Every structure is written in C-alpha cells, then in structure tokens.
Image (cartoon, rainbow, N blue to C red):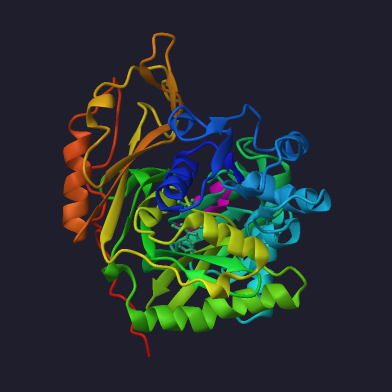
Amino acid sequence: MRILIIGSGGREHAILWSLVKTTRHSLKFYCAPGNAGIAQLARCIAIPVTDIAALAEFATTEMIDLTFVGPEAPLAAGIVDEFERRGLTIVGPSWAAARLEASKSFAKQFMSRHGIPTARFKLASSAAEAVDILARGEFGPPDTPVVVKADGLAGGKGVVVARSRSAAQEAVHEIMEGGLIDRQAAEQILIEEALRGREVSLLLFSDGLNYSIMPAARDHKRIGEGDTGPNTGGMGAITDNSVLDAGLLARIIRGVVEPTLSGAAAEGFPFRGVLFIGLMLTSDGPRVLEYNVRFGDPETQAILVRLQTDLAEIFFAMARRTLADIKLEWTNESSACVVLASGGYPGKYESGAVIMGLNECADEDRVQIFHAGTARSSSGEWITAGGRVLGVTATGEDLAQALARDYRLISKVHWQGMQYRRDIGSFLSEPPTVSNE
Ligand code: AMP
Ligand code: GLY
C-alpha cells in the first residue's frame, strides 16, 4: 500500500513518524514536498502543496492508495473534491467543510446557527464600517480590549488582540490596508469581544459520521518567554491530564463537538478529517475561538507521540467511514514539544546555518526530533531552512519529566542564532478554570 502525505512541516514529520512507528502493515510512504528530516522516512516529491492538479496526477500515476493532507491551503482550495472527482482516496474535509477555517465569518455564522458558544462578533466589509462599529461602543468603553480578525486565511497574521479601541482601529487599517495580508483574505473583517481564560486545543478524527477525540493540548503562540512578543506559528505545545478534566471535556463534547459535527452534516458538508477546535475556557464556560480543519502544528507533535493505535488504520477507517469500529489507544503519559527556531523568527529570519549536535542525539530515549525547516548542505551537514526548524518532543510520566527530556536534548543542539522558549509548559497568570456544571 502506498500513502502520500501532503505538507512539509514538523506536523507532517510527526505524522510520518507515527505512521512508521504504529503500523503493522507494509506501507510505502511519499511526501509532497516534505523536508530533509521527512526524507529519512518517505520519498519526497517536489510538488507544492497547492498544485492540486500535479498532486492528483502524481497520486494517479504512482497508484497511491490513500492521501492525507497536512496544511489548510490545499483543503481550502478543494483538493479533496478534486481527488474524489478523479476516484482517488483522500482523507480531509471537502472545500465546503474547509470553510470552517478558511472563512471566519462563515465559521461564526455557522456557530450562531447551531447554538455553539463563541465570542460575540460583528462583521464589516470596509475599514470605515469596522471603525464605526468600534466607535459606537458595542464592544465596551474605549479602554476595553477588542479582537480584530481578517476573514480569510492569513497564515496567523490576520488576528490582532488589541488592548483598546484605538489600538483596534489601528489594527483594522493595518489588516485591511496594510498590504501584509492577502487582499482577498481581508475583504471582510470581524470585530470580536475579547475573551479571557485558558486556551485549549481539542483535536478529533472524524469520518463524517463518527469521531474520536485526541488528548487535549495547549500551545504557546508568542515568541518570548512569559508569553511576550509577537505571535508565531507556535513555539511549543503540551498534552497533560491537567489540560481538561473529564467533566469539562464532557461539557465541550455536548456543547461544541457534537453540534459542530451534526451541524456540518445537516448543512450538507459532513466533516471528514481532523478537526481542531481552539477553545477559551472562560468563567462563563467554554467558547470556541476558531476551527481549524487540520492537525495543529506543534500540537500534533505532542499528541502523536502518545498514539498507540495504528495511524494508517485510523486514516483508512476515516476514508471508509468505519471509525466507529476502532478504539483509539493513547499512552497514559504527558508530552511536550519545544520548538527551536531561527534567529529573527517570526520576522525575517536567517537560513543556512549549520546545525550542530543533531546526529549525536538521534537515539535519545523517548525524545523525538521532528524537522520543520531543515535541509542538507552539499557536504551533507544539516542546515536550517525555515523559521521554525526543529520540534523536540518527549513523553514522560508527568509533564516535568517530558520537559526535562526535551531540554536535556536541546542542550546538545546548537546553531548560530537558535532561539527557543525555556518556559514551555508553564502557563502564567491564568484565570481560574471554569467549573463544569
Ligand atoms: P484565531 O486564529 O481566531 O484562533 O486567533 C488566534 C489567537 O488569537 C487565538 O489562539 C487566541 O489566542 C487569540 N484570540 C482569538 N480570538 C480571541 C477572542 N475573541 N478573545 C481573546 N483572544 C482571542
Ligand atoms: N498551533 C496552532 C495551529 O496549528 O493553528
């Protein structure tokens, strides 16, 4: 059997590593376009993730049995619909279902239709309209924090949690007129009430009918320790029993997961793939911040190191809509992924630095190094080739043990300009968790 994974980051490396580790079948792996770390596990094919026609041609001529999509861009562009039109087996949400991530206004209106708790919002189609909404004071007095979001996919740059009304007005102009974000993505803008609480990432597999929840995760979005500085794609993530207790999970399943999946099915786009629900646990209960229609990065690295079930079987069950027939098993551990990034990231970063120490620590017990942005130099050395370079990911009996394993390994790896957070897993100034009545 042949499996094709689409994507090139730490997430895709973790997916391939997990497939290789858990499967009992004889499988051949391909990855488009992949990266230098992934090339140790799969044949990498130089096709960009958004060249859907070329990917479908490849899957046809190479007789790929199943394709799994990592990133959101090809999903939002309809890769699943196109593969299915050609009779190819692919696991991921359709174009219609991918709107839950690709259009924040679609997602908010969907949540309103199905009574799914989320932050209060207003939609504007021009900067003037957005500024006017803010000026009317609907989101509180001038010193109230407000959130401004571009409607479409903006690679993490489309959301500003503004400290005040005037900062929000600036953000409106920056998003709609600043030129940083794709014009189409910023045609509409959302103004949202700023929620306070603890953030949780809840991911699940769904075959369109049935679903299976993964261990809940938390991630660190900002570059600096103590959650300071600009947002990044994610500087680390953890899973641990303390993230969500059983009562709160049950409440989220009842109030969010089930209405989301049944709402999608009722509207004619049953959700098949990995759904990532970003939640804020507020003192008024859980609220959905966003949907992602894919595995998170770096949440996936921290989650999949605990998976014991054959991931290929999970993917095939999702394709055949038989997810209900398999029981997913996870180790009863904690896990942590610490991201090592290039100097300058998340701004303009340096590439091509020689990574020292990587080969020496390849066999550390219960620590995996997932490659996000690496390449090989002409003389075979590992070099940096991206903002986020490596995701060092460990399991442990508790979070402290997992983190200690990560940081012990990290002390042996180095390159010029390497940066990482030393406080992954500690979440400062958290408001109290909500009760779960
Ligand atoms: P999103 O892409 O919508 O998840 O937003 C990115 C990040 O912005 C989230 O992970 C939160 O940290 C923050 N955020 C988004 N919406 C809100 C909100 N309504 N209140 C507070 N923080 C938010
Ligand atoms: N870590 C957040 C995301 O993948 O969107």
Residue 50's spot in the image, x, y percent? 69, 38
Q: Tell me, yes or no, if residue 134 can be seen here.
A: no
Q: Is residue 399 magenta?
A: no
Which quarter shows the C terminus? bottom left
Q: Quadrant of residue 372?
A: top left
Q: Is residue 65 visible?
A: yes
Give percent across and percent down for residue 45.
61, 29
Q: Is residue 227 left or right of residue 173?
A: left
Magenta segment: does it hold 166?
Answer: yes
- Residue 127 x/y as whole percent: 68, 51
Our reading of the magenta stretch's main secondary structure is helix
Tally of marks: 0
Q: Is residue 361 above or below residue 212?
A: above
> Is 69 situated left or right of 331 in this image?
right
In the foreground, 406 or 282: 406
Q: Nearer the viewer, residue 140 or 22?
A: 22
**x and y, in percent, of residue 326 in the image:** 51, 71
Q: Residue at x 58, y 54 (%)?
A: 149
99 is higher (above) or lower (below) than 247? above
Residue located 63% across and 40% down the image: 181
Residue at 55 percent of width and 40 percent of height: 28
Stretch in magenta: 164-171
Q: Given the current orientation, which residue lies at the most extreme right position?
A: 85
